[in-house]
Image (cartoon, rainbow, N blue to C red):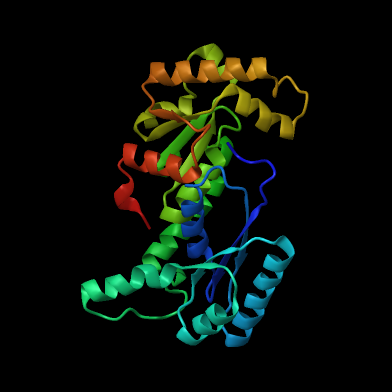
Amino acid sequence: MTDSTAKTRQIFIVSDGTAITAETLAHSIMTQFPDLRYHQTRIPFVNTVEKAIDTARRINAVEKEEGTRPIIFTTFVEPDIMRSFNELVSGHIIDLFRKFVGPLETELGMKSAHSIGQTHKIRDDEKYNRRIAAIDYTLTHDDGQTNRGLDEADVILVGVSRSGKTPTSLFLAMQFGIKVANYPLIPEDFDRGALPDALLPLRSKLFGLSISPERLSEIRNERRPGSRYASLANCEKEIADAENLMRREGIRWLNSTTKSIEEISATIMSELGLDKRKA
């Protein structure tokens, strides 16, 4: 049980680059402690000794004010910057860069590049262009805006409104260069008992998302509070009708209620054999 009186732990992600990679790793690690209350702060571009010293002092001030030792994830590449920061800061430091790169240098028998921002550099123009094209395609084909070019999609997500199709679509496009269209299933489809005509020839590309009626009602009430559209009874009916339709049509689907976008995307890519299409 979580102690309601426990203080919120401060988590800092500090890097001489964007800190995005460090934040992703830190988040993955901290999810293993579901009962911990914490506040996460990302501090990017700490790329000089002066900035390192200022950042260390800033973190120390938070520790003094909060009265608890902060947890600090770092990915410093430059030794001088790292040293200046580590000597001054007070907290539990987890050096993600050296934790993984050092052992790999030993195993591979070679030195790493020791260069800032390698993760986010554009190394392959073709892959980069494919990713941009996928993002453009996905935005154009969001929420059934157009049927043109649906056959060009790598995957077409279907499901009721607000079941997580748009964020999943954009994640797949931005991270992996996958062209995604998403198409809402609506009461008219359920009354007919059939998929929209535009989707019938593209069954092999379809993947469905569902969600618990309670969570769907919460999400819809944020958008249209008190409406029939957001009522629990309506959400229960739409979800039941959508799942029945997907079963009848043989569409693979999953419930997105407790899954992250990363988990949903990984499942879709595996189920449809898109793993080899990663950008």
- Frontmost residue, 160 versus 106: 106
Please, is residue 79 above or below residue 167 in the view? below
**Residue 150 appears at what percent x and percent y?**
45, 39
Quarter occupied by the N terminus:
top right
- Eyeballing the image, is 159 above or below 263? above
Q: Residue at x 49, y 13 (%)?
A: 193
Q: Position of residue 134 (x, y in %)?
A: 46, 53
Quadrant where the image shows the C terminus:
bottom left
The quadrant in which residue 253 appears is top left
Residue in the picture at 46% in, 84% down: 79
In the image, taking residue 86 as reference, residue 207 lies left or right, namely left
Residue at 51% from the left image edge and 37% from the top image edge: 182
Q: Is residue 194 visible?
A: no
Closest to the observer, 40 or 181 = 40
Residue furthest right in the image: 226
Q: Position of residue 156 (x, y in %)?
A: 44, 37
* Left or right of residue 50: residue 135: left
Image vertical order of residue 155 relative to residue 198, above or below? below
Residue 233 shows in this picture: yes
In front here: 24 or 167? Answer: 24
